[in-house]
Amino acid sequence: MPDARYEQGMARPEIDIGAGSRERKPVAERTTLLTGGAGFIGGHLARALLDTGRRVTVLDVRAYTPEARFAIGSGIDEIPFEVASIGDQARVLDVFRTHRPDEVVHAGMILDPAYLATNRSTAFQVNVGGVINLVEAMIAFGVPRLVNFSSIGVLPRVMYQPIDGNHPILLADSGPGTDFYGSTKAAAETMLFAYNQAFGFDFRTIRPSAVYGLGMNQYVGPIKAMVENAVRGQPAHFEFGGSHPRAYTHVRDIAGLVIAMLDAPDDADRIFYGSAGGPLVTTTEVAEVVRELVPGADVEIGEELSEAEKPVAALRGELSIENAHTQLGWEPQYGSIRDGIVQYIEQYRAFVGA
Ligand SMILES: NC(=O)c1ccc[n+]([C@@H]2O[C@H](COP(=O)([O-])OP(=O)(O)OC[C@H]3O[C@@H](n4cnc5c(N)ncnc54)[C@H](O)[C@@H]3O)[C@@H](O)[C@H]2O)c1
């Protein structure tokens, strides 16, 4: 097909990756390669993928966390598990050769912003190079579709609300607001568009926001300590942060959206926000919900923001899930934070009890 971008002396790539000619297998016959499957979102996602009838192969640098093990539950011992780094091209190719996946979900990356800033070459090799390694393996083995985990951390500041897939991630005076985390995510996102525009490579990117649920990590503020301490009968007191607003998203909604994205129509958008949509929720409101749901919970938070939190809170904005609704037919199951915290409390209780 003629393409104006390759006129004016630019060499059009001669590489045919076979995009467009591939039949997708029925869901029950597919093997999904899930990177980062030993972690928080990965564990819940593995469970949700198994529940669709898929086979799952996990690739991660570490063993399952106890919470991921619990979230996956029955069938976990039948999941092939490859201890491998997505930063190692040879190893990634080995995994593809062994398991011949039909689709890939890429959640395995380094999140710790301090680690990324102090280990900048590793940040690039894993968070950006890892995506390239996966895409090249997918091309080599004819694997048609990737869902890539990015983050709202790619956003520089709020230019309008609700923030949608057309919101800029680079401005004249600033880039992604979360330094090496957001910038490596943004770099990976742009490289996926390069593969798509040059070769027709098929991908979709999810940008989750403030994901909570059993096994959640510490980067989403006090909600984890509030819920888990309340269930264990321990206090959770915070001096600062009550007015910090977030677009909290239940981990099961992230899993449901990823599954919808794996079967997105060919003409669907490439970027979707992993959010419940609607107004932002403050940490003070989270504390109120926890106190209501766990009688006797000793949960308190001061309204003021700490100095460190002020610039981060300023990045928050309402997120649009309109394209997920209209193009994928997806709706969040936990549209209200209260419903999501009810599920988190129940599953955490069951986890502690086990
Ligand atoms: N949790 C959130 O609120 C949130 C928000 C936005 C985006 N995300 C994204 O979702 C994805 C999953 O995050 P999570 O919250 O489950 O965190 P997590 O740390 O629990 O999971 C990440 C997994 O990636 C694995 N990993 C790290 N380096 C790797 C490597 N070199 N090769 C293979 N695996 C590697 C880790 O061992 C871990 O199991 C990440 O890409 C993250 O950036 C999460």
Image (spheres, helix red, strand yellow):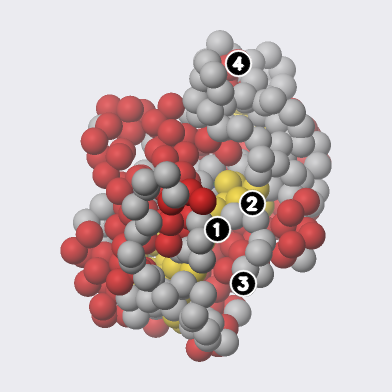
Secondary structure of the residue carrying numbered label 2? strand
At 39% from the left and 82% from the top, the residue drawn is: 78
Is there any visible trace of residue 296 in the rendered image?
no
Q: Quadrant of residue 220?
A: top right
The residue at the point 54 percent across, 19 percent down is 172
Q: Amino acid at mark 4?
A: Lys
Label 3 CB-ligand 1 distance < 8 A: no
- Residue type highlighted by circle 2: Phe
Q: Rounded to the nearest whole Å, what is the CA distance between mark 4 and mark 3?
A: 39 Å
The disc label shown at residue 272, or none: 2
Q: Which residue is mark 1?
A: 204
Is tag 1's residue or tag 4's residue first in the polypeptide sequence?
A: 1
Seen as rendered, the residue at the extreme top is: 307
Q: Residue at x 43, y 33 (%)?
A: 183
Q: Is the residue under label 3 in contact with that under label 1 (CB below 8 Å)?
A: no
Which marked residue is nearer to the observer: mark 4 or mark 3? 3
Disc 4 C-beta below 8 A from ligand 1: no
Which residue bears the numbered disc 3? 263
> SS at mark 3?
loop
According to the image, label 4 marks what residue?
310
Residue 68 versus residue 78 in the image, above or below: above
Q: Residues within 10 Å of mark 1 (few under 14, many from 20)?
A: many
Horizontal and vertical percent position of residue 316: 66, 29
